[in-house]
Amino acid sequence: MSKVVIIMGSKADLEWSSKIAKTAADLGLDPVMRIASAHKVPLKCLEIIREFEKEPVVFITVAGRSNALSGFADAQTHCPVIACPPYGDKFAGADVYSSLRMPSGVAPMVVLEPDNAALAAAKIIGYHNEAIRKNVMAYQEAQRLKLEKDNNELL
Ligand SMILES: Nc1cncn1[C@@H]1O[C@H](COP(=O)(O)O)[C@@H](O)[C@H]1O
């Protein structure tokens, strides 16, 4: 049980979503990707959620501009939802606010970097999966060693 379901609002989000999927796979997770827009095909979004929530998955939602997908998904499933909207520099990055303020009873988490979204999913799944937990710890240790090496190069 290590599935991470990445739902993106458009094929335009595929490159961003693939970064999440790659890091998720590197951490030993089993990523799957689907395309469905909460604005345009809400029933399809729901169908995907219903298909995958039968097992304890983490959903990662990727929607640019106006992100309805993350709140929609979170309100429809008991599984954790992590919003990882792609950067948009138009309108001074204001798109991100649509991922931040949710109505009562709706709680998608927001992680803005694709690698970090995969890591957050791994930490959640790691609670019940020792192999994934070990991968998370190894990932963190590799970062520590890299920082130490980078620092030592300046000595
Ligand atoms: N928020 C939203 C709802 N439906 C699509 N989007 C997002 O809007 C951007 C452009 O989508 P499209 O290709 O449909 O114009 C993509 O980031 C997509 O996730």
Image (spheres, rainbow, N blue to C red):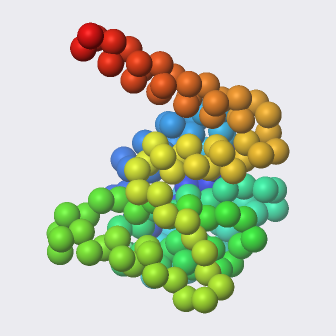
Looking at the image, which residue is at 55% across and 65% down? Answer: 109
Quarter of the view holding residue 141:
top right
**Who is closer to the viewer here, 41 or 118?**
118
- Quarter of the image with the N terminus is top right
Query: On the image, which quarter does residue 128 sit in?
Result: top right
Q: Position of residue 4 (x, y in %)?
A: 64, 50
Q: Is residue 64 among the parts visible in the rendering? A: yes
Q: Residue furthest front?
A: 155
- The picture places residue 130, in percent across and down from the top left corner, at 79, 34
Quarter, ligand 1: bottom left
Q: In the rendered image of this protein, does residue 51 appear above or below residue 101?
A: above
The structure residue drawn at horizontal position 41% and vertical position 18%, both measured from the top left corner, is 148
Q: Residue furthest bottom?
A: 104
| Residue 84 falls left or right of residue 65 | right
Q: Residue at x 55, y 88 (%)?
A: 103
Give the quadrant of the C terminus.
Answer: top left
* In this view, 27 is above or below 11: above
User: Number of callouts in the render?
Assistant: 0
Observer able to see residue 40: no
Q: In the image, what residue occupies the spot 62% across and 59% down?
A: 59
In the rendered view, tell whether residue 108 sits above or below residue 136.
below
* Horizontal and vertical percent position of residue 33: 55, 52
Q: Is residue 78 left or right of residue 113?
A: right
Closer-to-camera residue (99/33): 99
